[in-house]
Image (cartoon, rainbow, N blue to C red):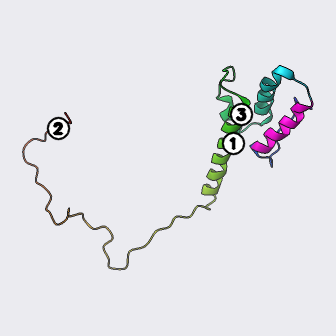
Amino acid sequence: MFYIAKKTDDESVAQWSARLRDFASKCGFGTELEVVMRDVFVVGMGSGRVQDRLLEEDTSSQTVTLVKLVEIATNKEATINASKQWTAGDASINFTRPKEGENHHKADKGRGRQPRQRQGQMRCLRAR
């Protein structure tokens, strides 16, 4: 059951990780627990953007732990959910309209000063 476990569509990354830990606790993997759980976590994630992101990691590296993969997957899941909200139009943009006849884009006069006229060549100044 452990090796064929799959994340369900309505399950979050955190829920999937917890369910996988529960399965693994009954298997007695000993010292191989971390490696086996890491592999089943990625494979059981199912195809999609979260799994694609996890597969970008070099799992042969000692620094890529199950905890790190869960963190990466959680971040990717949050990004996907936020993106869905934006594209669904849930994100609102607030702005004010200028009153009729009011010039909304006023030229910056630099506190009443006239813009300097450039004459001759421009010089490039740098800090010394």
Q: Position of residue 51 (x, y in %)?
A: 71, 35
**CB under 8 Å between discs 1 and 2:** no
N-terminal-most mark, 1 or 2: 1
Q: Which residue is mark 3?
A: 67
- The kind of residue on which mark 1 rests is Thr
Quadrant in the picture for residue 126: top left
Residue nearer the viewer, 30 or 101: 30
Which residue is drawn at the image coordinates 68% and 29% (left, top)? Answer: 55
Q: Which residues are magenta?
A: 14-26
Q: CA distance from mark 2 to mark 3?
A: 52 Å
Horizontal placement of 67 versus 101: left or right?
A: right
N-terminal-most mark, 1 or 3: 3
Residue 124's disc is: 2
Q: Position of residue 84 (x, y in %)?
A: 65, 53
Q: Is residue 89 magenta?
A: no
**CB under 8 Å between discs 2 and 3:** no
Could you classify mark 3 by the number of other residues whose Cα lies within 10 Å: few (under 14), some (14-19), or many (20 or more)? few
Q: CA distance from mark 1 to mark 2?
A: 49 Å
